[in-house]
Image (cartoon, helix red, strand yellow):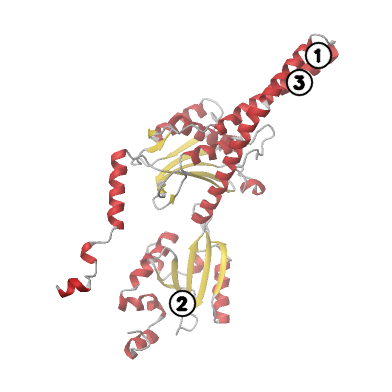
Amino acid sequence: MTAESNPHRRKSALTTPVGARLRVIADDNRACILEALPNVILAIRPDGVIVDANAAAESFFEIGKPILIGQELGRLVPFGSPLLALIEQVRERGSAINEYRIDLGRPGMDGERRVDVHCAPLPDSEGGVLVVLQERTIADKIDRQLTHRGAARTVSGLAAMLAHEIKNPLSGIRGAAQLLESSVGDADRALTRLICEETDRIVRLVDRMEVFSDSRPLEREKVNIHVVLDHVKRVARSGFARHIRFIENYDPSLPPVAANRDQLVQVFLNLVKNAAEAIGDAIDGEIELSTAFRPGVSLRTLGEKRPVGLPLEFCVRDNGRGVPEDIAAHLFDPFVTTKTSGTGLGLALVAKIVNDHGGIVECESHPRRTTFRILMPMYRNKEEEKRADERRTRKQQPAAEGMEPTPRERRS
């Protein structure tokens, strides 16, 4: 029986105050649906006070529900946020409004928080507004990762072509220049040396790019990421980052990562070196290395039958000058660099290695706070994988106790 056909339930819904609007549907045990939804749901009073929220809102604002309810929304979002203007428009028009990719980041939050917003008037409430937020951060992260993977494949094909089509002619050019050097005068000998030097420089560049065309199977093992980061820190302190203060923010209970240790060292050396170069000669330079367990993100990779969880988060943060906005979206593409003598292959190599491990790499850059974040799968041996597959299979099979008996079974 619906609420419309039951006058008692309909009356209860109409007379319920705004503060209980989200809990009205508990009559049919539907309140649990709102709590399980990944979207943030808020009920806003005419004076802008939050009077109800679901579990996703607690996680998004990082505030418990007892404290969240009763707060003014304006104190939880940036000053002059478009969200507040949307709520006012809903009250004026009396109709729903959608807005996409609004930044709800605020001081104290790590990085931007872009969301899609749906605002609608609450029925039977004068000035009450229902706000639904769908976070775009994860979706944008996956979109950027797919772009990075496409760039890595482009570099792999380009590297293979360069190695075959360029290195052989270069050796002939260098040999001819060396022969000419013995038969020309002193004035022209400088030109032949320049030819040899530039040829050697191109060969070194092609040698670096040959790393991208390596298609051999990745040999993974059980790796303690903290051992890798400590090694990278020692190398950096003994050379390019000796004047920079390192901060360690590690989760000591973090499980091992399934990775190739040497390649992980290369990834974090590139990231720490970039951070040190962004800091430059600043006397207050800091590089923070952090690890954390962040369940909830999974990604389907080539060769995998199912999505792979990426619960291990590794971050390299610095307080340098940051990434210019005009190259931020293409930071992991090959030949993209702000350095006058750079090749633009360091971060492209990072993207390729992380991609080969089935992980995600992204960059968030703000004034004096640039974060390179890597998400990777944790290590599981074959027995653990087998048990996980068995548990997954059992969940997918319908429970015999919950199956509806057939008519023949009823008659018997």
Q: Which amino acid, by three-letter code, is at mark 2?
A: Arg
Q: Position of residue 308 (x, y in %)?
A: 41, 47
- In which image quadrant can residue 55 be found? bottom left
Residue 181 vs residue 40: left or right? right
Pointers 1 and 2 in contact (C-beta within 8 Å): no
Marks 1/3: CA–CA distance: 10 Å
At horizontal 48% and vertical 84% (from top left) the residue drawn is 126
- Whichever of callouts 1 and 2 sits on the residue coming sooner in the sequence is 2
Quadrant location, the C terminus: bottom left
At horizontal 31% and vertical 52% (from top left) the residue drawn is 392
Looking at the image, is 86 positioned above or below residue 390? below
Circle 3 — which element?
helix
At horizontal 46% and vertical 38% (from top left) the residue drawn is 247
Circle 1 — which element?
helix
Looking at the image, is 102 positioned above or below residue 5? above
Q: Which residue is mark 3?
A: 195
- Packing grade of label 1 (10 A; few <14, some 14-19, many >=20) is some
- In which image quadrant can residue 340 be found? top right
Q: Which residue is mark 2?
A: 45
Residue 58 vs residue 195: left or right? left
Number of numbered callouts drawn: 3
Q: In this rendered view, identify the residue nearer to me: 310 or 283.
A: 310
Q: Position of residue 328 (x, y in %)?
A: 62, 47
